[in-house]
Amino acid sequence: MGDILAHESELLGLVREYLDFAEFEDTLKTFSKECKIKGKPLCKTVGGSFRDSKSLTIQKDLVAAFDDGDQKVFFSLWEEHIPSSVRDGDSFAQKLEFYLHIHFAIYLLKHSVGRPDKEELDEKISYFKTYLETKGVALSQTTEFLPFYALPFVPNPMVHPSFKELFQDSWTPELKLKLEKFLALVFKASNTPKLLTIYKENGQSNKEMLQQLHQQLVEAERRSMTYLKRYNKIQADYHNLIGVTAELVDSLEATVSGKMITPEYLQSVCVRLFSNQMRQSLAHSVDFTRPGTVRKLKDVPLLPSLDYEKLKKDLILGSDRLKAFLLQALRWRLTTSHPGEQRETVLQAYISNDLLDCHSHNQRSVLQLLHSKSDVVRQYMARLINAFASLAEGRLYLAQNTKVLRMLEGRLKEEDKDIITRENVLGALQKFSLRRPLQTAMIQDGLIFWLVDALKDPDCLSDYTLEYSVALLMNLCLRSAGLIPPTLIIQPYVNGALYSILSVPSIREEARAMGMEDILRCFIKEGNAEMIRQIEFIIKQLNSEELPDGVLESDDDEDEDDEEDHDIMEADLDKDELIQPQLGELSGEKLLATEYLGIMTNTGKTRRKGLASVQWSGDEPLQRPVTPSGHRNGYPV
């Protein structure tokens, strides 16, 4: 009891501080009145009222500097009192800071009577330009702010249509209101009451730390078991190697004495050097009576054939969990197989057995898994189709029936729950766009309009979705039927699409009217050499008067040439797996080899050679269909 009385004043002060912070005004009055009646002393928390008054002073100083257009004082206070974690990590704070820089840059243009002082105006514009070249670079790929990067280079922004909104009477008051609300939230968050801090440190944070420690312990135990197994295997191999080494030394000594070593003895020694799985094949594949045949060990073995009838039956009638594991295992067979004969054999087996039921007319087929009620099954089906589309022969298989294209388009427009499902559907469609008939079908289905609508807000898209959406849009815009009135990764596709649509006279005139050349020249000053050359081509197209030859692909020529005939298996196909096998469950190749082994029918197929392709020059915008992964790897397009 004595300890409680000794700290009673401080405890009551903590309660009072929290009630004041949470704005329980009536409760606070009742609490203070009762403490006074009972003669309980209320200890004021150290620095509470002082912090409040100091915060109000800082807020007033910031707003005053905003009203006076004093950017040096404003940003000095801003950087001193707004935490760097908020300035650099909060998207709203970054956008607000950008608009504040614009406010100070155009302050003299809006508030000067007559012509503003040129030297002072140049200083403000220079300050804004420095910001754009340093901290402002982070927002340079955001559509909302893109036009403002041309502001320092426009002679008279007040009459330019792109900056009309900045000079409206309502723009500055609205910005000031946003600033005041932001400051109130930031300074309120910085005045966290001590009671809340104690709770976080000793309550919730301890619980979260305990959970983290438990997860770390489980992970450490799992790693420990893995390392122990590896250690035991290495130890066994070591003892085996020591034994073989001793025998070989004895054999060398024997040869010195003139004793011959038989091929059978060498074969037995070699068998001991390799794992049990290789012993049988080793015994039959290596002829120790002929030098040099050990190189056959480096050959990649073909994977065993599967019972595809049973596989497809379980994919249609099995449980959702079994379907997901099967789709995952079939995809892993493609993505983890060695490029060359092994992967080609796997793909040909899938195609010859019509794994996805592309040629089936039954109402229930494997393709229908794209519309499964299970999010996991839908996602894994989309991943498998994307893996097929990553290979030229797989694209040819899928393209033989427009049913696949229609289902993918429907899934793309309907899928709003699972981002990865949409990414894989979009990736497959983008690879489909390398084939001309499918390009035509996608244009006729209005996919361009869906892409334009999706790209209106690129900040909400993942990197994969943004990159493949722009690449697909570019491939479709390269066709004359596809013409309609962005990070460094997507710039080549944006430039290619822009170069193509500027061949239309009406769009060209509209682009000139909105001052596109000024905006493009702004990028020239900041881009690398390759981007600069591409933008110069676009400016030349913008100022041309005729349709350049060869920019658009004719819709009359529907020859199937699949110009992008290389195979690219992306690492993203196997990222963020949703399911993990439980104890006793089979997955991956072990599931296929245990439950679905079939008669050995694997046959290699000669890979068809693509047409002679043209190497893309980085100087010009892309003018032929291209896949992002192929473009990054420098394949001919």
Image (cartoon, rainbow, N blue to C red):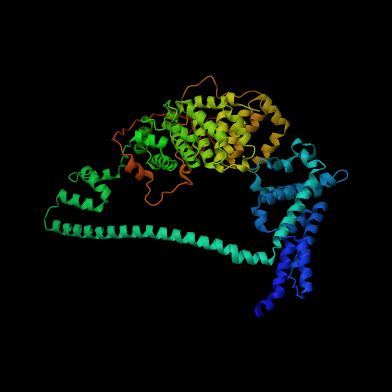
* Residue in the foreground of this view, choosing between 441 and 127: 441
The reply, left or right, for residue 389 in relation to residue 622 is left
**Rendering coords of residue 425 (x, y %):** 51, 36
Find residue 343 and report its horizontal and vertical position in percent: 37, 38
Residue at the extreme top: 556
Write the residue at 14% across / 58% down.
254
Above-or-below relation of 162 to 548 = below
**Residue 150 shown left or right of residue 169 in the figure:** left
Q: How many marks?
A: 0
Residue 142 drawn above or below residue 28? above
Quadrant of the image occupied by residue 255: bottom left
| Camera-nearest residue between 614 and 475 | 475
The foreground one among 607 and 331 is 331
Residue 494, compared with residue 63, is above or below; it is above
Q: Residue furthest bottom?
A: 2
Q: Is residue 304 visible?
A: yes
Considering the image in quadrants, where does the N terminus appear? bottom right
Q: Residue furthest right?
A: 113
443 w.r.t. 311: above or below: above
Residue drawn at x 39%, y 33% as measured from the top left: 355
Q: Is residue 134 visible?
A: no
Q: Position of residue 234 (x, y in %)?
A: 31, 58
x then y, percent, for residue 80: 72, 60
Q: Nearer the viewer, residue 458 or 350?
A: 350
Residue at image location 19% in from the left, 51% down from the top: 268
